[in-house]
Amino acid sequence: MSESPARYRTQRRVEFRDTDAAGIVHFSAFFPIMESVEHEFLRSIGVIVMPSHDNPDSLTWPRVSAGCEYLGPARFEDVLDVSLFVDRVGTSSVHYRYQIDCAEKPVAVGKISVVCCQLGSGGKLVKKPVPDTIRTALLARD
């Protein structure tokens, strides 16, 4: 598979809270990093991240799968370069891939899959097709 260009790039500084007793980023810290980069990306393309309970047409994007492979260490105050790729947009799903580097060395690769849902009555999630406007924005190339 040929490498597609990153859809979104940003940086995160490793916080003390992200590290373990050895001073290395704890494996669990990569998941909030990936999620926050996804939210930053969605806001950058005009997609609302948090559904409005007042708007019955509001969408939300619950995770259905997440994984991360750890390739090297990162430490407190390191700057992580995070690239988000939109690997696939299905009928109702979006599949993201992440490349996380530190000083141009691979630290981790991750994947998150989300499903487009509408917040129904009583907080029930109802799966919906990804709207065409959002699909176009997700797949656009700058």
Image (cartoon, rainbow, N blue to C red):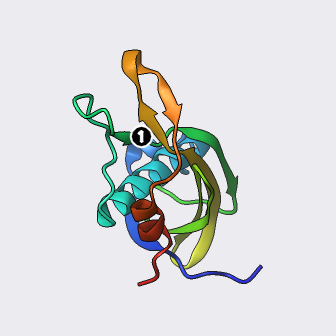
Return the residue nearer the eye: 64 or 27.
64
User: Can residue 29 be seen in this snapshot?
Assistant: yes
Return the residue nearer the eye: 69 or 136.
136
Return the residue nearer the eye: 117 or 33.
117
Image position, residue 68 (x, y; %): 66, 51
Image position, residue 23 (x, y; %): 52, 48
Q: Is residue 61 left or right of residue 112?
A: left
| Residue farthest toward the left in the current orientation of the protein | 54
| Residue farthest toward the top in the current orientation of the protein | 122
Which residue position is annotated with label 1? 60
Which residue is depicted at the point 63% across and 71% down? 106
Question: Which of the 4 quarters of the picture holds residue 65?
Answer: top right
Image position, residue 10 (x, y; %): 39, 69
| Residue farthest toward the right in the current orientation of the protein | 1
User: Can residue 81 be seen in this snapshot?
Assistant: no
Which residue is depicted at the point 47% across and 43% down? 61
Image position, residue 39 (x, y; %): 38, 53
Question: Which of the 4 quarters of the picture holds residue 111?
Answer: bottom right
Which residue is depicted at the point 45% across and 70% down? 136
Amino acid at pointer 1? Thr
Return the residue nearer the eye: 76 or 98.
98
Label 1 environment density (alpha carbons within 10 Å; few <14, some 14–19, many ≥20): many
Q: Is residue 84 left or right of residue 42?
A: right
User: 116 above or below 122?
Assistant: below
Secondary structure, mark 1, is: strand
